[in-house]
């Protein structure tokens, strides 16, 4: 118990509003049981094949791209708390209607509308956490939010797997009610969103640049452009956990695939809860770009093990352990990396731009993977994923050198 209390004590000393956002994330994700099942819904409820599923995924991603850009602009120019509350309220309405109507394409359309609203709020959420923390505290704050998201997700995917066959409507109802509770929590208790004043040397890269356009900020920060390429490829690689893995589980295990995938997703969240504080503490001094590199290596190892012993359910859980370690490393590096290197005036827009690039890459990859999966073989689809992963590792090695040259003050703090 002393070990665990020591690990969680690293999250002390943050602003009250950060803890409210943490609890809000827990409550929201307690009901986030629908999206992990999207592939299964399209495949087993609506009878779509792999390429058709990928087309739906790509269509949703294309719709989310402009929503992300709009959300980023709103985050930089409007009250971030208000953006979060309004977007959440719209998503609540969509989920409640999904629970009330028969399963069909209209249900999927409403799901996508809810997803678009939540995508629109994401830049505000990220920028708000950055606004409320000093540079030296930001890794802890983003780690805490990530921990909260997964605390809420621990049981929801397994429950979704149990409800999937006969009571899918109840999953939509639970999702809507959970997000409603989270929205009320943020609306009533997050009151002071005044950005902190950070006078440290490392914060010099975050000086507001109100007169500059987004492209001018990126032109002045070429290392960020490399990071954008990495983030786009990472998104395409990571999303196969929600696409190729459930497709293979459904192909090998049939109707039991949804429940198996639900338990795997729940295990993913349990591992995040258990290991995020430990990895955050042990690797606090590791530069963010090396966290990205470690993350990609673990994700590749997880996918490799899954494929090597496909059909063995216990192996899925070991593969999930490796994959989730990779996810933790990448996630605790991501938020602090961007927010420590870009002007505070552009946080929302750059976060949105990262999401849009990742969305475009995910769409291209999903169509390619879906076509290869149907026309050639599942193994061919996975080969494309591993080729992208290798390319991303090479890109990260280039980013390591470019980042140290561009932001030496951040490295002097290590």
Image: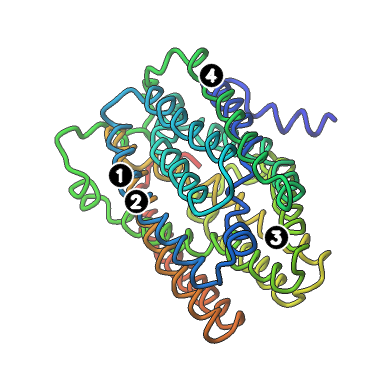
Task: List x then y, in percent, for residue 244.
Answer: 60, 68
Q: Secondary structure at mark 4?
A: helix
Residue topped by disc 2: 65
Q: Is residue 154 left or right of residue 124?
A: right
Disc 4 and disc 2 in contact, CB within 8 angstroms: no
In the figure, residue 412 lies in which quadrant?
top left
The residue sitting at 70% across, 68% down in the picture is 250
Q: CA distance from mark 3 to mark 2?
A: 30 Å
Q: Is residue 300 left or right of residue 142?
A: right
Location of the N terminus by quadrant is: top right
User: Which circle, 3 or 4, is nearer the viewer?
Assistant: 4
Q: CA distance from mark 3 to mark 1?
A: 33 Å
Task: List x then y, in percent, for residue 169.
Answer: 64, 42
Q: Earlier in the sequence, mark 1 or mark 4?
A: 1
Q: Earlier in the sequence, mark 3 or mark 1?
A: 1
Residue 69: give its label. 1
Residue 322: give its label. 3
Vertically, is 77 above or below 215?
above
Residue in the foreground of this view, choosing between 166 and 373? 166
Residue topped by disc 4: 184
Q: CA distance from mark 2 to mark 1?
A: 7 Å
């Amino acid at each position: 118990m002393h070990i665990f209390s020591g690990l969680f004590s690293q999250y002390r000393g943050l602003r009250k509003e950060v803890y409210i956002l943490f609890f809000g994330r827990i409550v929201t994700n307690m009901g986030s049981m629908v999206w992990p099942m999207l592939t299964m819904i399209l495949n087993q409820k609506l009878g779509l094949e792999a390429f058709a599923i990928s087309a739906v995924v790509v269509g949703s991603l294309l719709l989310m791209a402009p929503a992300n850009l709009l959300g980023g602009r709103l985050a930089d120019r409007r009250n971030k708390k208000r953006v979060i509350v309004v977007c959440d309220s719209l998503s609540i309405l969509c989920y409640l209607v999904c629970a009330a109507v028969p399963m069909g394409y209209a249900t999927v359309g409403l799901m996508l509308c809810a997803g678009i609203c939540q995508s629109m709020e994401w830049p505000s959420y990220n920028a708000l956490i950055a606004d409320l923390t000093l540079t030296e505290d930001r890794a802890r704050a983003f780690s805490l939010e990530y921990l909260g998201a997964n605390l809420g997700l621990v049981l929801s995917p397994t429950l979704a797997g149990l409800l999937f066959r006969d009571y899918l409507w109840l999953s939509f109802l639970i999702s809507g009610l959970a997000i409603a509770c989270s929205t009320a929590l943020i609306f009533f208790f997050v009151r002071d969103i005044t950005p902190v004043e950070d006078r440290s040397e490392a914060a010099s890269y975050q000086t507001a640049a109100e007169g500059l356009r987004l492209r001018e900020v990126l032109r002045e920060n070429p290392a960020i452009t490399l990071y954008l390429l990495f983030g786009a490829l990472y998104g395409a690689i990571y999303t196969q956990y929600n696409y190729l893995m459930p497709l293979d589980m459904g192909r090998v295990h049939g109707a039991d695939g949804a429940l198996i995938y639900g338990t795997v997703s729940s295990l993913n969240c349990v591992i995040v809860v258990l290991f995020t504080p430990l990895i955050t503490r042990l690797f606090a001094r590791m530069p963010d770009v090396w966290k990205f590199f470690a993350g990609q290596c673990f994700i590749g190892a997880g996918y490799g093990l899954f494929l090597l012993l496909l059909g063995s359910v216990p192996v899925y859980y070991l593969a999930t352990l490796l994959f989730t370690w990779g996810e933790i490393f990448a996630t605790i590096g991501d938020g602090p990396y961007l927010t420590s290197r870009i002007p505070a005036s552009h946080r929302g827009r750059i976060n949105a731009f990262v999401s849009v690039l990742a969305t475009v890459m995910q769409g291209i990859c999903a169509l390619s993977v879906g076509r290869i999966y149907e026309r050639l073989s599942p193994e061919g689809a996975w080969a494309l994923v591993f080729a992208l992963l290798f390319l991303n590792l090479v890109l990260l090695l280039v980013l390591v050198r470019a980042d140290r040259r561009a932001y030496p003050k951040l490295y002097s703090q290590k």
